[in-house]
Amino acid sequence: MKLRGLYAITDSQLLAGKFLAYVEAALDGGVTLLQYRDKSSDEARRLREAEKLRELCSRYKTQLIINDDFDLAARLGVGVHLGQTDGPLTPARALLGSKAIIGATCHGQIELAEQAAKEGASYVAFGRFFNSNTKPGAPAASVEMLAEARKRLHVPICVIGGITLENAEPLVAHGADLLAVVHGLFGADSTQEVTRRARAFNDLLKISV
Ligand SMILES: Cc1ncc(COP(=O)(O)OP(=O)(O)O)c(N)n1
Ligand SMILES: Cc1nc(C(=O)O)sc1CCOP(=O)(O)O
Ligand SMILES: [Mg+2]
């Protein structure tokens, strides 16, 4: 099945004290991929939280992706997202198996995406498209590049970086399959608002949940 939909990404600071409640609210509104992104080195907590997310995802039939750490992904039997400095795709694919979802960061460079697709990436991620609270220093990507990438690539295209309900539409119109969002989804005042936003992102992608 082609990967398309809302790609929710967790943020340990933003979700402090409301982690599982906000994640479940998002899943309730419809999430195709959920990424566990925790940049700390507290391995025991990371394992505990990832296990809880795996259980939640299995209840909501959502695919869990671990950021950076393919050993943790292999331990849990889930997918992984790898940046340009997080290790090569080929051994990750060998470790996780042919069915695992493996994503690759490609910044604003179509050549990186072509290479990642050749090495077996399940989706390629371009960004940052807008100013991002979560990762302000990420390299920039443009809508023109996205349109060109759509013509050249046959793998699902994920977009990331400062995406909100207000600015996502042109990205969908220019070929994005997956909208990867932290603040624009979880930076909400209530669980009800998280669910409403998730549903609205799915409406933008014309996905019925
Ligand atoms: C879906 C998605 N796209 C891009 C990234 C960024 O990955 P990376 O460049 O490795 O940076 P960190 O997230 O690890 O700080 C991502 N995580 N997810
Ligand atoms: C983790 C990440 N990677 C990016 C990239 O461009 O590669 S932007 C980003 C942060 C996404 O969070 P928000 O939706 O809050 O901007
Ligand atoms: Mg990374």
Image (spheres, rainbow, N blue to C red):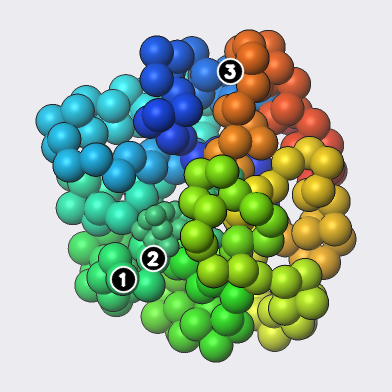
Q: Is residue 155 above or below residue 171?
A: below
Please state the quadrant of the image where ligand 1 appears.
bottom left
Q: Is residue 195 above or below residue 68?
A: above
Q: Residues within 10 Å of mark 3 (few under 14, many from 20)?
A: many
- Which residue has dot 1 on it? 85
Q: Quadrant of residue 194?
A: top right
State the CA–CA distance, disc 3 to disc 2.
Answer: 28 Å
**Of helix, strand and loop, which one carries label 3?**
helix
Whether the residue carrying mark 1 lies under 8 Å from ligand 1 is answered with: yes
- Image location (x, y in percent) of residue 206: 84, 43
- Which residue has dot 2 on it? 83
- Image location (x, y in percent) of residue 204: 83, 42
Q: Quadrant of the N terminus?
A: bottom right
- Of labels 3 and 1, earlier in sequence is 3
> In percent of the image, x 61 and y 55: which residue is there?
160
Q: Is 129 situated left or right of 107 in this image? A: right
State the CA–CA distance, disc 1 to disc 2.
Answer: 5 Å
- Of labels 3 and 2, earlier in sequence is 3
Tell me if label 1 and label 2 are in contact, CB under 8 Å.
yes
- Which residue has dot 3 on it? 25
